[in-house]
Amino acid sequence: MNADEGGDGDSTKGTGTLQYEPAKKSSSVCDPVGVSLADFLKQSGNTDDAFGLTRLSSDNIVFPAVSVKKGILEKTDASMQVSSIFLQAQTFKDKGVVILQEDGGVEHNYCPKGKYDRHWEITQGGANKIKEGEQEHCNDFILAFNSSLAKYRDAVNEAGTKKIKFGSEKEAKNYLKRKTKVHPDQWISTFWCLASKTKIRDEMNWHLPKFISPRVDKNCTKAVIRFQSNNLPEVGKHGSDEIIKDCEPAKKK
């Protein structure tokens, strides 16, 4: 289970604390979809370290723009669509092997030592938990969007609706900086800073399956790992507001 954010290479880490009020309308879409192994591999390439994948690309984001026409800010938009998939309940063989060091033992049905192909059995409960983990990445991206791009869009449109007059684009940007606490030239980098925080979940191993215990089947032909909901004990414990924060933009030179 992991999350990717990318696009323009403008992802930065910030220092300090900048508080945002979420916008009323997110204009964002992120709904994890259960897929077969074959479909998962088409998008992820492998299952070595992932049972779900949530991606955000700049190609799927509409960034708010600042444009002044006849002294009035023109209406702008902001939206986001996130791709999110997870492995639905199913069984499959991956590239791994399980090495049985000793003969015998109840756990391994007295099978001989050696290498056994590794198979996964994702239960419905396990699939539901994987989906919940990917939804956490979705929620992170949505909060990042609401805390930045949606807010910036609303500030532009509010000024335009009120027909506030500006002598130049620079004057309009300075006004928007006072309204949003972020200069428009840094709106995109601030968003990517917030969005990139979702990687903390993977860095902290909150989405790493735990208590994995492969068992060789009774015919001694393969090793099976049963993936259940309790294999992801950290999922559901860390809200988006815990990590999507602390992205104060750098001072404009």
Image (cartoon, grey):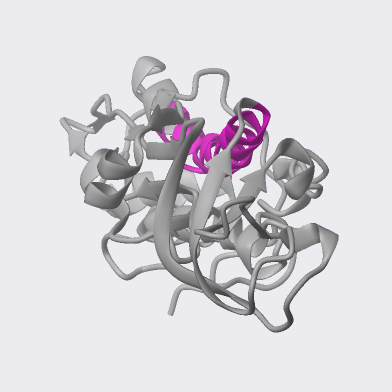
Q: Is residue 183 among what the camera can see?
A: no
Q: Is residue 98 shown to the viewer in this render?
A: yes
Front in this rendered view, residue 222 or 112: 112
Of all residues shown, which one is farthest toward the left?
70
Q: Residue at x 37, y 38 (%)?
A: 82
Q: Quadrant for residue 160, please give it.
A: top left
Q: Picture coordinates of residue 227 (x, y %)? A: 65, 44
Give the quarter of the image for residue 67: top left
Asked if residue 126 is among those painted magenta in the image, a careful observer would answer yes
Indicate the position of residue 174 as horizontal and vertical percent values.
44, 52
Q: Quadrant of the C terminus?
A: bottom left
Which segment is the magenta one?
A: 125-154
Residue 107, placed above or below residue 230: below
By secondary structure, the bulk of the magenta-drawn segment is best described as helix
Question: Picture coordinates of residue 136 (x, y %)?
Answer: 62, 40
Q: Residue at x 83, y 43 (%)?
A: 237
Q: State yes or no: residue 66 in magenta.
A: no
Depth order, front residue of 86/80? 86
Residue at x 68% of width, y 73% of height: 15
In terms of depth relative to the viewer, which is nearer, 95 or 88?
95
Q: Residue at x 73, y 58 (%)?
A: 109
Left-right relation of 224 to 76: right
